[in-house]
Image (cartoon, grey):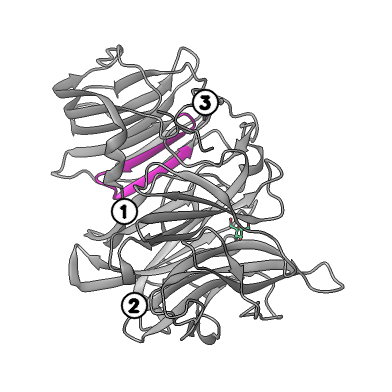
Amino acid sequence: MNNMETKQQYYTETYRPQFHFSPEANWMNDPNGMVYFEGEYHLFYQYHPNGTTWGPMHWGHAISTDLVHWEHLPIALKPDEHGMIFSGSAVVDWNDTSGFFNGQSGLVAMFTHADTYPGSERPRQRQSIAYSKDNGRTWVTYEGNPVISDESITDFRDPKVFWHKETKKWVMILASGQTVRLYTSKNLKEWEFASEFGDGHGSHEGVWECPDLFELPVDGYSNQKKWVLFLSIGDDPSFEEGSRTQYFIGEFNGETFTNDHKPETTLWIDKGRDNYAGVSWSDIPNEDGRRIYLGWMSNWRYANITPTKEWRSAMTIPRVLTLKTMKEGVRLVQQPVQELQKIREKSIHIMNQTIVPSENIISNVKGNTLEIIVEFEFGTAAEFGLKVCKSNLEETVIGYDVTQQRLFIDRTNSGKSDFNESFVGKHEGELSPYDNNKVKLHLFVDWSSVEAFGNNGELVLTDLIFPDQNSKDLELYAVGGNVKVNTLEIHMLKSIWRK
Ligand code: FRU
């Protein structure tokens, strides 16, 4: 891991993501404890170090100074006498409210200890803390663990903690079955129950997991803020989508979250299949920075059986979250972090071209680690878009249906898919044109994923794909007429793992 610059073969296994985070070996799921401290972004993650399927959970650890290149560090937290280490968060305790740091600042992690009730098979989930005085390199679990337990609730997990400036308290939000519970604390050790949210609100098509709660300006106005609540819902076999993440927009007064929408309104953060358990964090102290986010790029429906060998799963690219007023109301917008521009290598720029059926103007361009930004202007075509990771045998289609006003990723013929019958398919979401007749696509294509941002992130689709490594052709296509490409940029992206 330390001589990553020199190893030519490092991270070149079949399907290995080239610019997404994945563990060197073995199983990974949720991102945990995302925090920025003293120039470093910390990424902890649900990790099973002894196998490529889910198993006794540890917190794996990596750091980055630029959100693009990651350095693997030793495991941060291991199962102990209270159980496995499930998902959670980390905060900088700037003013030593916990008393762990002799008046200095340090990192405190909050997570779920998962075991079973003594003498029974019934799962027991309790909240615990650990602290680090050396920038996350080593951790001490608190002797008073667990700090929150409630014997009446079985699914009780994934604490996300943040500092609430107005009430000068720590707030914890955690999932409890089909609701979330909120607690407050002055010192991260003693917690008081504050409120519960969720009964009858949003989607309950699966167990509630991995909540997040944060404030964002609307349309960039800092005097007009809203609170956003993320909530992942687990895989329930009766619904075809598998696991996915919804969000709510509303108000939060330090104790209670109030939903702005009707309870039955359900908003999804991603219309693809492979973005789950994501969490947000800020890169300036006291939650004032950019709101950055990344998710686990998989789906519990098939996460344990995807066709990779040495490791399993990757994270999405980091994205910046904002809120925008659209015709249907205030909505979440996600855009790739700008830092990713530094892995652009060779670039191709095309302007003002008309695309007609059966002529591919980029047939000479090849690649499978790509960033593509394209503005289309409607012509007579009923559908248009791009085909990527293409050969005579396979292709992944990212297309726009003009009549339906829908952006889609079609991975029906994208490569290996026989590991699960629900993998093939077309995933889509609504995307209204701007200026009446334009849509913009921003795509990231890696060796086993596609992320599509429509109209500057108003709609996002994240999908895994498992194409052959030699499927490197690209196509700009139009169906049933023509479409204009006003601007097109294709950037070949460098591996973040090798020099
Ligand atoms: C979500 C989740 C969490 C839990 C963790 C266990 O993917 O089920 O609720 O803490 O994974 O690995």
The answer to which of 92 and 490 lies nearer the viewer is 92
Asked if residue 414 can be seen in this view, the reply is yes
- Residue position for label 3: 12
Mark nearest the camera among 1 and 3 is: 3
At 61% from the left edge and 32% from the top edge, which residue is drawn?
308
The x and y percentages for residue 468 are 52, 20
Which of the 4 image quadrants contains residue 35? Answer: bottom left
Mark nearest the camera among 2 and 1 is: 1
SS label for mark 2: strand
- Residue position for label 2: 251
- Distance between the Cα atoms at labels 1 and 3? 28 Å
Q: Ligand 1 falls in which quarter?
A: bottom right
SS label for mark 1: strand
Task: Name the quadrant of the C terminus.
Answer: top left
- Residue position for label 1: 320
- Is residue 344 found left or right of 142 in the rendered image? left
**Kind of residue at disc 2:** Glu
**Kind of residue at disc 1:** Val
- Distance between the Cα atoms at labels 2 and 1? 21 Å
At 53% from the left edge and 52% from the top edge, which residue is drawn?
61
Tell how many labels: 3
Residue interval drawn in magenta: 447-463
Residue 210 within the segment the image draws in magenta:
no
Identify whether 377 is placed above or below 334. Answer: above
Mark 2 is surrounded, within 10 Å at the Cα level, by few (under 14), some (14 to 19) or many (20 or more) other residues, namely some
